Amino acid sequence: MAHYQAMGSIPPKRHTQHRVPAKGRTPRQGDLFYEELMGEEGFGSDSSLLYHRYIPSTISGAREWAVGDMTTVPNQPLLPRHLKLHDLFSDKDIRSTDAVTGRRLVMGNGDVRILYVVPGADSPWYRNAIGDECVYVERGSGRVETVFGSLEVGEGDYVIIPRATTHRWLPKRSRKEPLRLYVVEANSHIAPPKRYLSRYGQFLEHSPYCERDLRLPVGPLLAEDVGAEPDEPTNVYIKHRGTGPGGIAGTIHTMPFHPLDVVGWDGCLYPYVFNVSDYEPITGRVHQPPPAHQVFEGFNFVICNFVPRKVDYHPLAIPVPYYHSNVDSDEVMFYVDGDYEARKGSGIGKGSISLHPGGHSHGPQPGAYENSVGVERFDELAVMVDTFRPLELGEAGRAVDDGIYAASWSRGWPEVEEG
């Protein structure tokens, strides 16, 4: 995303000497800072330059990290499914769960994985070397500390973290509502849809959000700012390509210093936050198709959100979606808030996921089509991921499948038999 930012101490010209000033604490006065280019697509796309106190390539140890159960099974027989994510973590589980190692795989394919976690503990330092992450904060609040700076996050935030960004998640303890995270891990980059952007990367006038809606890191953030010593040995958990399930492996690198050693950076690649309440819904006289609700895209998948909005105002409009077949995609809807009009009577509620696979014609539950006539507003909030390759079920998805959703359109007809 070509939205240039500069933060902290950087030299006047790139790839030139940048030295510790007279009042510098660490390293010694006059030493060079070490410049790192963090860039996408082999120097051919967005990048940022980061200036480190220490050589960023330095490691003092390495060992394997078992990233958890990444196995998936095909959705066979082909069925629409209802998954209850809030059943995945008990109150006891939350206390010892962190936002990195505690993620559970709901579903995925070769392009994207959808995971869920309810963390109560601070995460280790972490770097995803496979692809970008889009983390939706369903509930609660926390702080994300990164080498670019810190991000305060809360309910309704999309947190976009570029590939290979070293960061950690710190939940804020609350008796009222724990931090609940819906995680989309890509094998590619995640960005605003190209049709929202000019050829130079500026948001265009028809985009439902723009640069003013984005929250950027606050920094620089150094080890001493978080109560650590600059030369404190630190473990960094790395998710990377491998020969394990889903082609995923994990490694823990031990660095002989703290990862928060970036004194300044500039460029167009960095983490940022966008809150769903700042999304301006696109409406029309008749029902608008899902692309009107798109917020981000990656390779072979898109992310959409359905927000509270005025609905169709043609005098004969039917506001809920028409029945449709996902010819080229699987549709995953995560229900966050409100009463989703098209799913009334299906058992779906807050914290539910519906999976509507390609090859199955789906739409409103019985009665919802007729009952929506005359409705002027939908008070609902949902996050949708559409993929262009079939999704398989992970261990978490299989654990919370209600087993009866496929029959929710069949009132008055024989029950669906799976086997």
Image: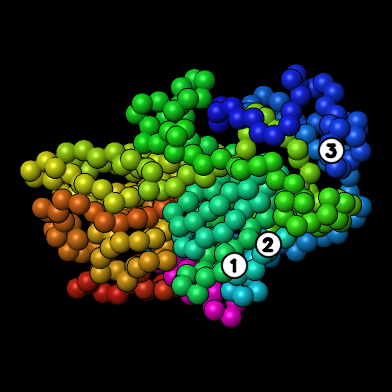
Count of numbered circles on the image:
3
* Label 2 crowd bin: few (<14), some (14–19), many (20+), radius 10 Å: many
Disc 1 element: loop
Say which mark, if any, is on residue 241.
Answer: none
Amino acid at dot 1: Pro
Q: Report x, y in % for residue 135.
A: 54, 52
Amino acid at dot 3: Gly
Report the side of 406 relative to 199 (left or right).
left
Residue 386 appearing in the image: no
Q: CA distance from mark 3 to mark 1?
A: 37 Å
Residue 95 colored in magenta in the image:
no
Mark 3 or mark 2: which comes first in sequence? Answer: 3
**Which residue is tagged 1?**
119
Mark 3 or mark 1: which comes first in sequence? Answer: 3
Q: Residue at x 26, y 48 (%)?
A: 309
Amino acid at dot 2: Ser
Q: Report x, y in % for residue 60.
A: 92, 52
Quarter assignment of residue 284? top left
**Which residue is tagged 3?**
24
The colour mode here is rainbow
Q: Residue at x 68, y 59 (%)?
A: 245
* Label 3 crowd bin: few (<14), some (14–19), many (20+), radius 10 Å: few
Disc 2 element: loop
Residue 90 colored in magenta in the image:
yes
Q: Which residues are magenta?
A: 81-93
Quarter assignment of residue 189? top right
**Which residue is tagged 2?**
123
